[in-house]
Image (tube, coloured by chain):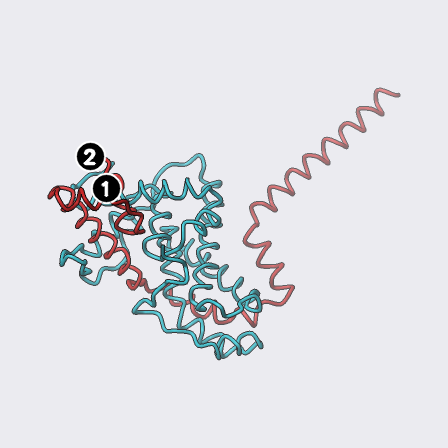
Amino acid sequence: MRCEEVREALPSYTRDGDTGLGVRRHLSSCAGCADELVHYQTLFSSLEQLRSETVTPPPELFHQLASIPYRTSRGQDVRSHVVRHRNRYAAGLAVAAVGAGAAVWKTRRGRVATA
Amino acid sequence: MRRPSDHRDGASSERVSAEIVERCKNGDERAWAELVKATHRDVYTLCLRILGDPQDAAEATQDAYLKAWRGLHGFRGDAMFQTWLYRVASNSALSKHRSRRRRQSHESGSQDDVLTELPSSGSVEATAGARIEVQALQAALARLPEQYRTAVTLRDVYGMSIEEMAQQLGISETAAKVRVHRGRKRLRGMLFEGEER
């Protein structure tokens, strides 16, 4: 195998164990690709450990989450849904208003034409 | 290949006992508060890593816990509770991500500045004794294009399977593999060669 082929295969070889004998053979005789392997091993090990690096959430978040059982009544759900999607509801209302206006205008125009 | 159930416990994550989950299923609000206390840092961090914005991450976290509360009866206990919760959380974060992309389809700009604010507590030890500073790694992840960042985060930080990732992202398994592969190569380039491609 050529170095370019091996280097292309190295991420999944290192992380997922997708291996071919050719890659292993090449690595045993090519110092450059072996160095590359170490880079990927370092990268994957570091990424895995990143999982234990957590971020402190906003302080109010815990209380919001902990209160979910108290505020999941049907009425609350509907209210929070409407608030979260208020832009969509506003757009929908605007479209409905335009549609209604157009219908009224068309009806009046029809009456005028008939008269 | 690692499956989602291979998630190891992060240092910050307390294991949620089956007893607490059962009490939650029975509507015990105190048990729910315990469960939230034990898991919300990890869930928020996962959402932040996918979304890059604290406000969006907090909203996705709320969505996730709301779904978790409502879907607790669907948790059969054949996987670890945290694994199930991560799945729900990544789903919420990805939904948020999709709706945000639709909303911002005509805007440009990145969230990188926010992600680079993720805290650093030194460096992590690698197999060959080499180290990558946590801050450097997080900054490099943040500089990845969104689709690669999400793919690498889900696969290599949280151990999600390609199959499940494809399902959650709504793409083919081949596309998921390509995103992971390209993301990994870019990360390696940034960290070891200073490449920004």
Residue B170 lies, in percent from the top left, at 49, 44
Question: Going 84% across and 22% down the picture, which residue do you hit?
Answer: A112
Please identify the quarter of the rendering in which residue B183 is found.
top left
Residue A92 lies, in percent from the top left, at 63, 42
The residue lying toward the viewer, choosing from A11 and A25, is A25
Dot label at residue A37? none
Chain with colour red in the figure: A
Give, as a three-letter code, the residue at label 2. Answer: Arg
Give, as a three-letter code, the residue at label 1. Answer: Gly
Mark 1 or mark 2, which is nearer the start of the sequence? 2
Residue position for label 2: A2
Q: Chain of mark 1?
A: A
Residue B45 lies, in percent from the top left, at 36, 60
Q: Chain of mark 2?
A: A
Q: Colour of chain B?
A: cyan
Label 2 and label 1: CA atoms lie apart by 10 Å
Question: Going 57% across and 49% down the picture, which residue do you hit?
Answer: A86
Residue A18 lies, in percent from the top left, at 31, 48
Which corner quadrant holds the C terminus of chain B? Answer: top left
Q: Give neighbour class at mark 1: few <14, some 14-19, many 20+ (Cα, 10 Å).
A: few
Q: Nearer the viewer, mark 2 or mark 1?
A: 1
Please identify the quarter of the rendering in which residue B10 is found.
bottom left
Residue position for label 1: A22
Q: Give neighbour class at mark 2: few <14, some 14-19, many 20+ (Cα, 10 Å).
A: few
Note whether B171 is above or below B125 in the view shown: above
Question: Going 31% across and 61% down the picture, which residue do you hit?
Answer: A51
Left or right: where does residue A99 sit relative to residue B105? Answer: right
